Image: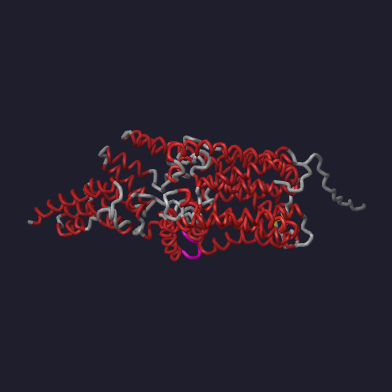
Amino acid sequence: MGQKKRVQTAKKPLEGGIPAAWRLLVWLIFATGSLFFIPQCLDRYLTPRFLFVSAALLISLVFLWKDLRRHGDWRFHGFDLLLLLWYGLNMASIGWAFNWSEGVFYTQKVLLLFVTYWLFRQALARDEKGMRDALRQAVTLLTYAVVGILIIQMGFSVSQFGLDNKHLYDYASAVFGNKSLASDFLFFLLIFNGLLYDRDAQADASQKRNFRIAAALLLCLIVLLQTRTVYMAVAAGALFYTSARSIWEPGFFSDFKRKILPVAVVIAGLVVALLALKGSSSTLAERLNPLTYLDSQTANERRFVWYKTDLLNADHFWLGVGNGSWKIWFPSKSIQGAYRLQEENVVFTRAHNDYLEVRAEMGIIGIVLYCAMFGMAFLAAWLVLRKKGTGQRERHDLLVLTAGLLGYCVIQFLDFPRERIECQVVLGIFFAYIAFHTRTWWERRPAVGIQRLSGLFLWALAAGLAFNLVVGWNRVKGEIHNVKLLEAQARHNNQEMLSEAKAAQNAFYEYNDVVVPLCWYEGIACYEMDRNEDAVEAFRRAYLLNPWSFQVINNYASALVKAGHYRESVPLFEKVMEINPRFENGKFNLAYVWYSIGDYPKAMEWVNGIDTVANPQTREDRLKNAQLLKQQSDFRKTIEEKMK
């Protein structure tokens, strides 16, 4: 008996480019996903886009299943493994995160980053031209849609308030939530337009015209939206692109001297002129002037937040506090010294610095791994750019992509793209395109082949995305009820508020957008309806979910007082004052508890420690001071009578 020979069949050549499902992937997660929102949600963009992009990726994966099994690249090179390791660390951090629901949500956003990257890398390997054409169409539509919406919104704002930064922040919200996030995305659209502009195309006067119009519109809106972070991103990207291209393309250097350098000199002159306008009444000039930033309230607040985060990091050096937990832990280091946090009850839910937030939540191990992803992308791009055999198209793409990734790194130093779904999609596409153009460099490095496990891997991705649908749906449902409970609170309808608070809570959604536990609203409703023991229990659960929110602790202690548990309330009120030493309600409450217990000297001590707003600038501040002084005077007289 002769042995049967095992015949290894070659892959069938592809005809007609990539299947339509690959093009659908581009349109769903990039174009549609970046515009999707649900107006009934508390945050109309974040969780809805998490849900939508998860569904879009899952649908794409199902349609592409057979194609991926047959034609997919099943060698995981170093960058693939780096991204998988980052996701694995995020998953592990759920184990030491303060709260399951927040840890899971933040972790599964990393899954969206990885799946976007991996599917785009597969698509580019299959048919780069087909994907480029699909991406160009999506970018063009998205550019004019976003620009059109923002122009309309800014028109309403400018017609009423001029180029006032505060009102622009509120008005430019229809696409991404606020003007800073809108500016971030305009920068990414600028990069994509530059990436997909074919300088060597035969044709195409119309393509050049469209590119110039799109670039001009995007740059004008970026300037008018007055987001300094994006100004720096544009400057860093432009400086890198022009410098690097001058090095590798001698012909460009002559054009650079003749056309670009004179423009740069003019811009430099304008910058010098703007620096001279520091302190003038022109809002736009002040925002354009980088020297004014360090004097701004925003800069002072961020320096304070970063300083306190460094103190937190010292206590959780190696592994951090866990995914999604920074916003809960942050007040534990006291908010003493932050005016808006203390006087106006402003709550910071992000560090406005992704590097620092990753360092806080993932420890030193996490920040090294996070920076390694960007570092390896830059390194691979640089080494391929230096290679003599690199083609002109490839070099152009890598220059633009590296400029875009550099701008992304600048933005996340003062902003929070890590949190937003559309930014994770952008980052995934950046990484995929860089990995595609540097594939020859990666292929010379060790890789892990998983051809035999390809089915298991696809099932794991599908299971993760299906789990995202469960997480996303529960959070969307919770946010919709959260909006209704806030409306009920505004109408003073305590019974409806109580029922909506209960309906909003689930295993994947336990906090509102400012980290107040939803059961806190149960406590408020019960407190107002004189259901004292129910209020105590609801506030106790809220306290367990956020033991460093001074508002939550204050309400818990107040409910204990109302229920007659005076002694139990004292350490809670004292904790309130440790977190926020200027919280006047806490001082009045402590004075009242000690007065009720009969310790009048301690009551007087807390009354005398009540502070007014220093240097009141507004009518509201002056009115608040007058009310505080009257309350202080009345309470002091009451205590003095008892002491006599």
Question: Is 313 included in the stretch rendered in magenta?
Answer: no
Coordinates of residue 549 in the picture (x, y in percent): 36, 52
Coordinates of residue 40 in the picture (x, y in percent): 47, 35
Q: How is the image coloured?
A: secondary structure
Coordinates of residue 490 in the picture (x, y in percent): 34, 36
Q: Nearer the viewer, residue 143 or 328?
A: 143
Residue at (74% x, 42% y) in the render: 130
Residue at (22% x, 47% y) in the render: 627
Residue, far left: 644
The magenta-colored residue range is 316-321
Coordinates of residue 445 in the picture (x, y in percent): 73, 63
Quarter of the figure with the C terminus: bottom left
Q: Nearer the viewer, residue 536 or 196?
A: 196
Q: Decide if residue 67 is on the left or right side of residue 13.
A: left
Residue, far right: 1
Residue at (64% x, 38% y) in the render: 141
Q: Decide if residue 298 is on the left or right side of residue 577.
A: right
Q: Is residue 572 visible?
A: no
Q: Nearer the viewer, residue 65 or 144?
A: 144
Residue at (79% x, 44% y) in the render: 202
Residue 131 sits in quarter: top right
Tally of marks: 0
Q: Is residue 20 visible?
A: yes
Q: Nearer the viewer, residue 329 or 394?
A: 394
Q: Decide if residue 119 is on the left or right side of residue 370.
A: right
Magenta: predominant secondary structure element? loop
